[in-house]
Amino acid sequence: MPSDTGLPVDDGKRGRLPPIPPEAMTPEQKRVADGITGGPRGGLRGPFPAMLRSPEVADRFQRVGEYLRFNSSIPADLNELAILITAREWSAQYEWYAHHILAMKAGLPPAIAAAVAEGRRPEGMTEDQRIVWEFCTEMHRTKTVSDATYATTKARFGERGIIDLIAVSGYYVAVGMTLNIAQVPLPPGVEPPLKPLPGR
């Protein structure tokens, strides 16, 4: 059964923390799984089958993610750009694969995503894309942002936008960590989309 990203749901045959069969779930795991499946994601996929080992974490985490995916103050194409930057920083193959699909649907130019995948500054960005790229890239690589970057981002997206960019980046760091450590597989036959970056 495909997901809302076009990815098939993992069959549980690979990975360190594969999906728990429904009949093996605790009542708390079942409650959380049903809540996720009944929400806007429409299914239990990505990091959540692994996260169900700690159902309270999975439940609280998915509520934050629901806001960041579907209700952020940052427009969808720019939000997906921030997610792709995070996926690249963590070489999170499944995260990149899933969100590249969503980024294309949201209207992010393929050339910008390709540059991010290669670890280089994209050419031909709009002003909004440039602001998001600079803010998120600087944040990941220096663990903060300069006064100039902060001021530019605040002038365009406001203080709420700054918090939403920080939150989506941090959230998808945790998603990428979970996917990488759980070794959530790509769909059968799909090659890892991210190549290693020199010196990284």
Image (cartoon, helix red, strand yellow):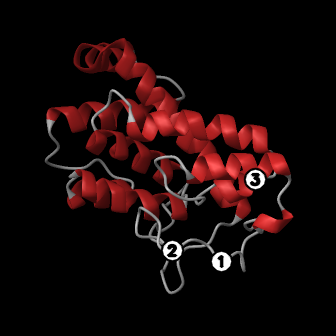
Q: How crowded is mark 1: few (under 14 residues within 10 Å), some or many (20 or more)?
A: few
Residue type highlighted by circle 2: Pro
Residue pointed to by mark 1: 11
Residue pointed to by mark 3: 30
Residue 141 visible, this angle: no
Q: Distance between the residues labelled 1 and 2?
A: 8 Å
Which residue occupies 50% across, 87% down? 189
> In screen coordinates, is 185 left or right of 106?
right
Residue type highlighted by circle 3: Lys
Contact flag, marks 1 and 2 (Cβ < 8 Å)? yes
Q: Which of marks 3 and 2 is nearer the N terminus?
A: 2
Q: Earlier in the sequence, mark 1 or mark 3?
A: 1
Q: How crowded is mark 3: few (under 14 residues within 10 Å), some or many (20 or more)?
A: some
Say which of marks 1 and 3 sits in front. 3
Residue 138 visible, this angle: yes
Q: Where is residue 111 in the image (x, y as percent from the top left)?
A: 21, 59
Contact flag, marks 1 and 3 (Cβ < 8 Å)? no
Q: How far apart are marks 1 and 3 (CA)?
A: 18 Å
Q: Where is residue 22 in the image (x, y as percent from the top left)?
A: 76, 65
Q: In which quarter of the image is residue 158?
A: top left
Residue pointed to by mark 2: 8
